[in-house]
Amino acid sequence: MPDLALLQGIHDEALPLIGQGRVADYIPALAGVPANRLGIAICTADGELLGAGDYLDPFSIQSISKVFSLIQAMSLYEEQELWSRVGKEPSGNPFNSLVQLEFEHGIPRNPFINAGALVVSDMLQGRLSAPKHRMLELVRELSGNQHIVCDKVVARSEYEHSARNAAICYLMKSFGNFHNDVDGVMKSYFNHCAIRMSCADLARAFFFLANKGVCLGGRRMISERQSRQVNALLATCGLYDGAGEFAYRVGMPGKSGVGGGIVAVVPGELSVCVWSPELDPSGNSLAGTRMLELLAKRLGRSIF
Ligand SMILES: NC(=O)CC[C@H](N)C(=O)O
């Protein structure tokens, strides 16, 4: 069982890695985040929360929001309709790559790269009257924290530097796989990415994937089968072109974001979130991955 001493030890061991990665700078508002932050929080099967380091500091969740968007789409669309517009395969390419999309006729490889999440956001736009608000409601319910908000400065900064994401949307539109106004969908997508949550919030929010689809508050968010499906996609596609390396080193379904957060789950046992803003070349938190690797090793856990 994880305890505070274990988490503190993992935190202290990863601390010297700070300085070896790079804070994301392609979104100017993110570049200003202090690089020396390091936090870890675990939510155990009985709902208890343990944390070490900066685990209560909110940060930009970025691509971690792609998991929340996917589960919204899974409850609004038939399985067949959803998966006819986005694939279930690892991309092996950077998260914001365009090349594969051209070859594959505008169908993104999976929902956890930008193209896939933008298609999912397009689908949500078609069914939800206030997508930004609904997302906040969802993360507040999942984490049990009513104070979670979106950072408008980060959302604006992303919008002002959105050429590549816009190109992805228009390329998909040219193939008939994007139906709504590009600007409107991108604004929702950036608002989702700019939500601020702490390791404690995210560890609690991902509890449902360790608990067969039922969240901490007791509500069923997705079916048990869907929960297994999401975990399978996270294990194969959650870390962009670093998914294989992450599976090898950590062995848990996980999702990273360029804000430096990574969430992971051991089904039936725990959900965990680590945060450290400096990233490796694939855009995954460098010290964060190390903390998860140490956790998996110390607890002797892996889904493989
Ligand atoms: N990998 C990420 O976290 C990317 C999310 C970021 N908001 C983007 O669209 O580029």
Image (tube, rainbow, N blue to C red):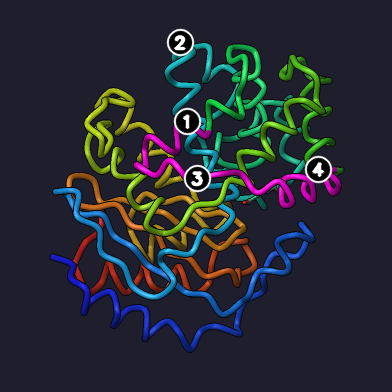
Q: Is residue 131 left or right of residue 275?
A: right
State the extent of the magenta-drawn residues as a range. 136-162
Pointer 4: what residue?
A: 159
Residue 15: image x %, image y %? 45, 84
- Viewer-side label of 3, 2: 3
Residue 128: image x %, image y %? 58, 15
- Viewer-side label of 4, 1: 1
Q: Given the image, on which type of amino acid does mark 1 rest? A: Glu
Residue 45: image x %, image y %? 16, 49
Which mark sits nearer the N-terminus, 2 or 4? 2
> Residue 137 has which mark?
1
> Residue 78 has which mark?
2
Q: Residue at x 41, y 59 (%)?
A: 199
Label 4, secondary structure: give it: helix
Q: Quadrant of residue 191?
A: top right
Q: Is residue 72 left or right of residue 297?
A: right
Which mark sits nearer the N-terminus, 3 or 1? 1
Q: Quadrant of residue 6?
A: bottom left
Q: Given the image, on which type of amino acid does mark 2 rest? A: Glu
> Residue 148 has which mark?
3
Relative to residue 184, is residue 158 depicted above or below? below
Which mark sits nearer the N-terminus, 4 or 1? 1
C-alpha distance separating marks 3 and 4: 21 Å
Task: Establish whether ligand 1 lies closer than 8 Å to the Cβ of label 4.
Answer: no
C-alpha distance separating marks 3 and 2: 30 Å
- Viewer-side label of 2, 4: 4
Q: How dense is the environment of label 4, judged by Cα within 10 Å: few (below 14), some, or many (20 and up)?
A: some
Q: Residue at x 37, y 43 (%)?
A: 143
Q: Given the image, on which type of amino acid does mark 3 rest? A: Ile
